[in-house]
Image (cartoon, rainbow, N blue to C red):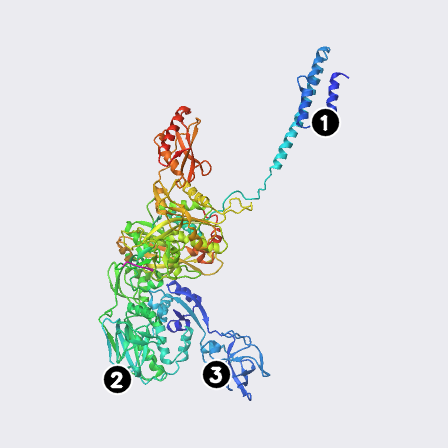
Amino acid sequence: MNPLDEVRSAWASLASEINAAGEQQLAELRSRFLGKKGEISGLMRHLGALPADEKPTYGAAVQALRQMVESTLDRFQEQLRSGALQARLENERLDLSLSGDRSEPGTLHPLLALRDEILDLFVGMGFEIADAPEIDTEWFNFSALNMPDDHPARDMQDTFFLEKDSGKDSVVLRTHTSNYQIHAMRDRKPPFRLLHCGQVYRCDADATHAPMFCQVEGLVLDQGISFAHLKATIYTMVRALYGQGAILRFRPSFFPFTEPSAEMDVDCRSVGLDRDGWMEIGGCGMVNPNVLVNGGIDPESFQGFAFGFGLDRMAMLRHGIKDIGLLTAGDMRFLRQFTGLA
Amino acid sequence: MKASLNWLKRLVDLTETPSEIEAHLTAVGLEVEEWCAVHELPGVVVGEVRRCEKVEGTKLSQCVVWDGANELPLVCGAPNVRAGLKVALATVGCVLPGGLEIKPAKIRGMESQGMLCADDELGLGEGHEGILELDPALRAGEAFSKATGIADVLFEINVTPNRPDGTGHLGLARELALRLGRPLRNPLEGVNLPAASGPATVPVSIEAGCGCTRYVGRSIRGVKDGPSPAWMQNLLRTVGLRSISALVDITNFVLLEIGQPLHAFDLAKLRGGQVNVRGAKTGETLTVLDGRNLTLQAGDLVICDAQGPQCLGGVMGGADSGVSAATTDIFLETARFVPASVRFLARRTQCASDSSYRFERGVDPFSTRAVSDYATSLILAICGGTSEDVQDLSTSEHPAGKSRVRLRHSRIASLLGMDVPASTVQQLLTGIGCREVATDAESVTWELPGWRPDIFGEADLVEEIARLVGYDNIPTAFPSFPVAAVRLPAKEKWTRRIRRAFASRGLAETLSMRLAAQADQDRLRLDPADPRAKLVALVNPLSDETACLPRLAIANLLKAAVRNVRRQERSVRLFECGKVFGRDLPESFANHRTTGIGEAGRLAGLVTGPWSDRSWTGAETDSDLWKAKGVLEGALLELGLVPAYSQGAREPFLHDGRQARVSVGGRELGYFGEIHPLVQEDLGLKTPVHVWELDLDALVALLDGASAAQSVRIGDFPGTSRELNAVVDRLRHASEVVDSVCALEVAKNDLVESVKLVSVYEGAGVPQGHKAVLVRVSYRSADRTPTDTEVNAIQDGIRQGISSLAGFALK
């Protein structure tokens, strides 16, 4: 056997050993065969003794052997490494069904989130958001809105009175958001489009009435503003809130501060409720000239419309809330449900 | 207002279905809340008793009753059953209004198929003396309700306070007649009274200013007060009124038909035979119809005889002077009382009645006499008798004539956004009773009907036109406005960001009832001299729990915490952007008026109970002060505000050693701390409670006033740092050390990048009652690497500076 064949067979005899080899043995084999003084390098020493015509063939055969050994050792080494990595990763496996480190998700209040939405809607329609006090005098809450002292309309609204300093106009918790109309008119000059949203109070409490509830009110004043403009604005608003399919009805009604006055009803089925008939959503009308005068505005120069509606029932319908008392109870089990109200 | 369809049909021809009538009334602003068919009594027919035999030893009779098709065996217990009688026969299978289902029965072995009914069994009255005896002319087998005319439809109408005319069938019929284009049969027109029997014998006087402006009185003598006619009883029954007697029924009938209340006195009981309408004298008393004995106040409007009050004017009759079965002579009152006076009297005496309901809204001041005539004609026709001359007295306060309103054509178009033809306007306004009295090129002047006191001005007439034209027929049009950059105001914008910052930290936003109990405030241990101790109280609260206005937002959150814990919900994390009220707070809109009570926005939060970020370890940890403070700080930092904490004023409801005033940029905003253990115990809360309450308005002002964050140059050169360990009294804030370093002149060198707290240590190596505060000063330059020499020089300067401060020692 020539030395080349000897080395070949020596390598071939190691096949099973290589299969079982660890990193250490593979390094030894690499050194034994491929090292500078290794067996394959040693074969080249025989090159000089060969006849010239055999030299290229022999050289190529040695080189082929080197490559074969090298690639085999490389392959086994790679297998070893990836196996070890695999084992490590397996060992480090975690149960990702468990929750991450986090606090419970926080939530926004369903009524106040709806309020945000309504405000955005009206800002988008070009309305300025106005502020108003919740504590006011009877004049701003009633008289200025064309509800004089003995007006039966005052019976419609059970009013909370506050202890007052003697000699002053009676102080009340406002019974509606309409008091903002007078404050707003006194603070600005028309034309304007205004919206106000806030809490109001009435002596009334049962499953559908709370002594405090939330109203939203709009006021538009300019020259030549008409009932037709009111209708178009309300349609736009109601469809933005309840969907394009909402069917709306204007029904003659009575509010001392508007003339003509209307109540707005939506068709229950058209807004996704599972019942027939109409649902009252709010009131509206052309601002009564007396109210304009009380706001310091000349009714011959400016006219306009006002509208208002309650938010509590809208929030209750939207979220399937049955008891209005839950809205102000601060119950974590209730509040935690309203995720996703960004 | 309850309205009967049969009644309306008396006044206007109606062929429409009830739901069509509902739609018409609702469309003109007389909202029908609901309607229902009444007294239909399906299964009850007219029967004829063909044979009838008393059963010995019982009250029963064995009968054979003809139902129009068959002869039915039937056992009846009524004393008045007899052969030949036409009866109300409830047939087998029918269910009576009381819920009784008629089934075939055997009574004492006798077969009985059906039941003969009395009033009460049919829901028609209370009589149970015997079965109903029907008109012999009725045909057996006919449906009972149809044959007798009692089947009706009841409308429940929500009449707005501006429409007194809607409180009578006549007003409703007038609207229907106009809408349907049919004539109205006004019962007040064409009343023919027989000539008076003689001059009036009962003198009447009205005291000026007493609250009565017109009084029409009439004596009718020789009446016989029996039952009222069936047609009247039927109409009254539909609207829920039990028939009493003809005289009472007639006054009720006219009230419900016309909307004008009347009162019939028994003339024999009017002492002195006179009527004086006047203000009561202090101490006078009156026993009213509901049996209460009222002590009157000076000026209360009363109708008196020679001895004293007999009737609370416009509100309720007296118990002594009303008509009864024995009455033969009556004095009929038809008056106009001032709405405010009736309203006041009805409220004070808590005597709201059908009369006061109508007088408060205002009855037609010009039809008083006509209504008296109409009622008199009914009484004479039904009860007989003769009437004396009428007495019609008015005071100077009575409206002299109908009011007039000038309506410009241009105003209609301008307010409604549509042109309404003059002929339509004329037809509609005439239809509601207006009369054209003058015209010019621009306008028409209208005289208003007395039954519409709600119409004052032009806008009111435009409303009439709008509602009669139909709101549905008014077009829609968009107003045109100049382009404007509209945004949320600062308060809304920043409150929204604040709310999201807290919600994103695991807190639930709540909305507290802004009505509180003084008792809850009292638990907070506030000094009685503290202006926040006494809450602003309501004059007329619903309950003690909601009797006051909250002054501390935290009181509401504590209440919510208690409620949650009682429901086994121990982990409570709440925040709120709400309002508090107090006489010590600045008032808003003070340039408009004064209320003496201020309103202020508050950002409040509360954290208590279990708080574990890793939920599955099985170890439950309670939130602590640092968790709660972390929420508050994290949210403020996210908003770009760096909070500082100082040991200022102490809140008595907070743990004395665990509270701080919170400020930003030198402006104090409120407090943060742990609820005082005594308050916590008092509330029954098991875990420590951490709270904060900040001035929301000030916070918004800070956020809105903040300038945009500015970028500083970031260099690529390495920096270095040095530490400093200061020993201070343990009661001092560690932040003072950092602040003191920063305040040193030497630390203002450009090379100083930051000064940060590393650790706070108490224990071995630190003197008792002290703590070691380790602070790291970082040095860096954007242009070069600082040299050790220059860094050390600054650090030495800092050390010297700190060690020279009182109370600071370096370790």
Return the residue nearer the eye: B218 or A224. Answer: B218
Three-letter amino acid code at the position of disc 3: Gly
Q: Quadrant of the C terminus of chain B?
A: top left
Q: Position of residue B402 (x, y in %)?
A: 26, 68
Amino acid identity at mark 1 = Glu
Marked residue chain, label 2: B
Q: Could you say which is closer to the camera, residue B809 or residue B591? A: B809
- Is A238 drawn above or below residue B403 in the view shown? above
Q: Which mark, by number, is residue B198? A: 2
Q: Chain of mark 3?
A: B
Query: Residue most toward the right?
Result: A1
**Disc nearest the viewer among 1 and 3:** 1
**In the image, residue A329 lies at what x, y percent?**
44, 55
Q: Position of residue B117 (x, y in %)?
A: 50, 80
Could you tell me how far apart the alpha carbons at marks 1 and 3 are, in whole angstroms?
120 Å
Which residue does the numbered mark 1 point to in the structure image? Answer: A17
User: Which residue position holds label 3?
Assistant: B130
A318 horizontally vs B297: left or right: right
Task: Please report, as a chain letter, where disc 1 is located.
Answer: A
Work out how far the residue at label 1 is from the one at label 2, CA to CA, in angstroms: 146 Å
Residue type at tag 2: Gly
Vertically, is A58 above or below B363? Answer: above
Instruction: Name the residue: 25% across, 58% down.
Output: B442
Q: Is residue B475 visible?
A: no
The residue nearer to you, when weighing A243 against B140, is: A243
| Residue range corresponding to the magenta coloring | A161-165
Q: Earlier in the sequence, mark 2 or mark 3?
A: 3
- Name the element at disc 2: loop
In which quadrant of the rendered view does residue A47 lie?
Answer: top right
